[in-house]
Image: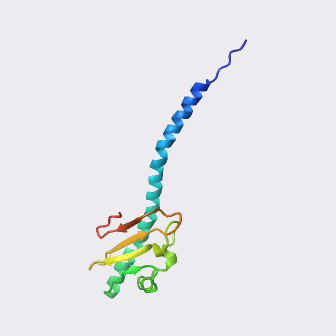
Amino acid sequence: MKKLCGFTLIELMVVILIVGVLAAAAVPLMRGRIDRSKWTEANAGAGAIRTAMKTYLMETGNIVTGSLTNASVQQALEIQSGDLTGSYFVAADYNIDSVNANGIAVITITGSQSNAPSGSKTLALDGTFE
C-alpha cells in the first residue's frame, strides 16, 4: 500500500492564519503610502504654480493671490485649468494664500475629486509640504 504525502488540515489552517495576520498588518501601511503618493501630484502642481508666480513677479513686479478658478489669476500666471488637471486634483483645488517679496507663494491644496485623499496640505514658504 502506498502512503499519501501531503499537508494536514491543521498545517493548512496555520498557513492561512499567518497569511491573514500579515495581510492585516500590511493593508494599513500600504494605505498610507497610497495617500502619500496622491499628495505627490498636488505637490508637483503647487510647485508649478510657485514657479509661475516667481516668473510673474520678475516680469511685472506684481503678485496675485486667490483660487486658480479665478480667470484673472490663471491669465496672470499663464496657467490654464487643464495644466493642473491630474488624476486626483484639478485647478480648483489650488489656492494661493500669500506671496512674499521674493515671489515665493504659500499654496493650500484641498482635494475635491472623489478619489482624492482627504484633508488639505500647504506648500509653505520654507518648501515644506504639510
The quarter of the rendered structure image containing the N terminus is top right
Residue positioned 51% across, 34% down in the render = 18
Residue 53 placement (x, y as % from top left): 36, 79
Query: Residue 25 versus residue 82: which sits nearer the camera?
Result: 25
Instruction: Give the image quarter of residue 96.
Output: bottom left
Q: Is residue 45 left or right of residue 115?
A: left
Q: Residue furthest top?
A: 1
The quarter of the rendered structure image containing the C terminus is bottom left
In the rendered picture of this protein, how many numbered marks are placed on residues? 0
Q: Is 68 situated above or below 20?
A: below
Residue 38 placement (x, y as % from top left): 47, 61
Residue 12 placement (x, y as % from top left): 59, 29
Query: Residue 127 versus residue 111: which sits nearer the camera?
Result: 111
**Scheme by which the image is coloured:** rainbow
Q: Residue furthest left?
A: 101
Q: Residue furthest right?
A: 1
Residue positioned 45% across, 62% down in the render = 118
Q: Is 78 situated above or below 41?
A: below
Instruction: Give the image quarter of residue 72.
Output: bottom left
Residue positioned 29% across, 70% down in the render = 125
